[in-house]
Amino acid sequence: MTMNTYAILRTTDITKLAVKKAPACAVLLYTLLLRYCQDKVSSYPGVKTLCRGLGGAYSERTVYRNLTWLCDNGFVKRKHRQSKERWTIVSRLVQKTTETLEKIVEAGEKVVKATKSISRQPNISVKTDKKHRQPRQHKKIKEKNSYFNNKRTQKRLSPVFAYERWERPVEAVKTVAETAWRDLCMVSHPPELSKASMAQKDAIIRGIKHTKELAWVLDVYPDILKT
């Protein structure tokens, strides 16, 4: 398999590694893991593979100790050795989560605007394009006044049905807790509750402890509630 011969290390990661006074081996391992991840969030090289990637300059014990340092300081999340997501880059995971939430919120706003415009015009007629043409009706239709034919006609002419037919369905807008978590991730990386406003902090803590929308956060940041 052909792999990239380079790795992109973000400026925020460099700053965080410097503030934490990361060992040289830990910085090299973090860069090597980014190379194995390529455009993904995680990868699964073994300790021996990482030793070979560093040219054999460090022993397996040293590599394992520095991997533990990266996990303890919130740079990498470790799973079982047989998992294909054995090493997850936390910064990329947060970035991907933030982008997904932004798309969901943007799509939700479009749905709300489209629904309001349709409700104001109940007799709106939707034009079809060549890719989504409705089947032609036969000139002679049997039982015009039948119950089922009337129901089909009402459904076809309904503005809500017309909208759902041509618009792609989207997910609902996320909750206040998830929006507060997204805003915190944009300000701080890794996210720290001390840098959030009081409203954001209350929403995030409530989402973790009570409503459980953010229960997954404890898996990625087990010490988030201590900050």
Image (cartoon, grey):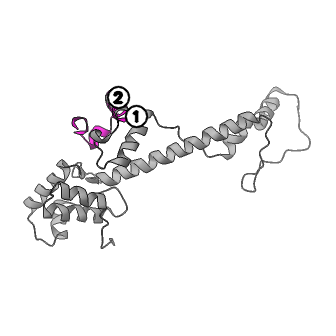
Mark 2, residues whose alpha carbon is within 10 Å: few (<14), some, or many (≥20)? some
Which mark is drawn over residue 206? 2
The answer for how far apart the CA atoms under marks 2 and 1 are is 7 Å
- In terms of sequence position, does the residue under pointer 2 or pointer 1 come before the other? 1
Mark 1, residues whose alpha carbon is within 10 Å: few (<14), some, or many (≥20)? many
Which corner quadrant holds the N terminus? bottom left
Can you say whether 45 is above or below 182 in the image? below
Residue 54 shown left or right of residue 204 in the figure: left
Does the image show residue 210? Answer: yes
Residue that extends furthest to the right in the rendered view of this protein: 140
Which corner quadrant holds the C terminus? top left
Can you say whether 88 is above or below 194 in the image? below
Observer-nearest residue: 208 or 78?
Answer: 208
Label 2's element?
Answer: helix
Query: Any magenta on residue 220?
Result: yes
Which mark is drawn over residue 67? none
The three-letter amino acid code for the residue at tag 2 is Arg
The three-letter amino acid code for the residue at tag 1 is Ala
User: Magenta segment, which residues?
Assistant: 200-227
Residue 20: which quarter of the image?
A: bottom left
Which mark is drawn over residue 177? 1
Residue at the image point whose x is 14% and y is 57% from the top: 21
- Residue 97: percent from left, percent from top: 40, 47
Query: Any magenta on residue 25?
Result: no
